[in-house]
Amino acid sequence: MFDAKSAGVSFCADESKAYNKDRKTGQVDKSPADNDSYVLYNTRLEKSEQGVWQTTSGTSVRGSKTCVQ
């Protein structure tokens, strides 16, 4: 929490099981998992007048040493 109406969230995502698929051909690109499969996300959230938390900005770092196992 930065204050009563803003906060930050950081998390790692393992995208090693996420694949691209060509919708026309149905071909799936199963690239092998590597350090780039792990992504660090940093987001800023702000609370609206209605009390709803909304993401207002975000960044991502593919292959971040923070996330690589």
Image (spheres, helix red, strand yellow):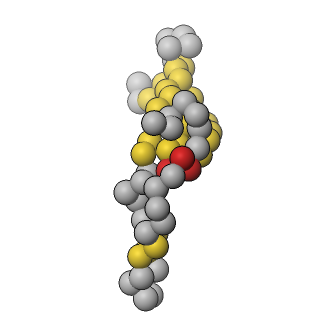
Report the number of numbered marks: 0
Query: Which residue lies at the image location 50% right of the left edge and 14% below the top edge?
Result: 1
Q: Return the residue nearer the eye: 48 or 55.
A: 55
Query: Which residue lies at the image location 42% right of the left edge and 82% below the top edge?
Result: 27
> Up-down: is 55 above or below 4?
below
How far across and down, in percent of the image, does residue 49 sit?
A: 48, 25
How far across and down, in percent of the image, does residue 41 sit?
A: 54, 37
> Up-down: is 57 above or below 36?
above
How far across and down, in percent of the image, does residue 47 sit?
A: 48, 25
Query: Which residue lies at the image location 46% right of the left edge and 56% below the top edge?
Result: 33
Q: Quadrant of residue 60?
A: top right
Q: Is residue 50 visible?
A: no
Query: Which residue lies at the image location 47% right of the left edge and 32% below the top edge?
Result: 11
Q: Return the residue nearer the eye: 60 or 31.
A: 31
Q: Return the residue nearer the eye: 42 or 50.
A: 42
How far across and down, in percent of the image, does residue 20 sit?
A: 46, 69
Q: Quadrant of residue 28?
A: bottom left
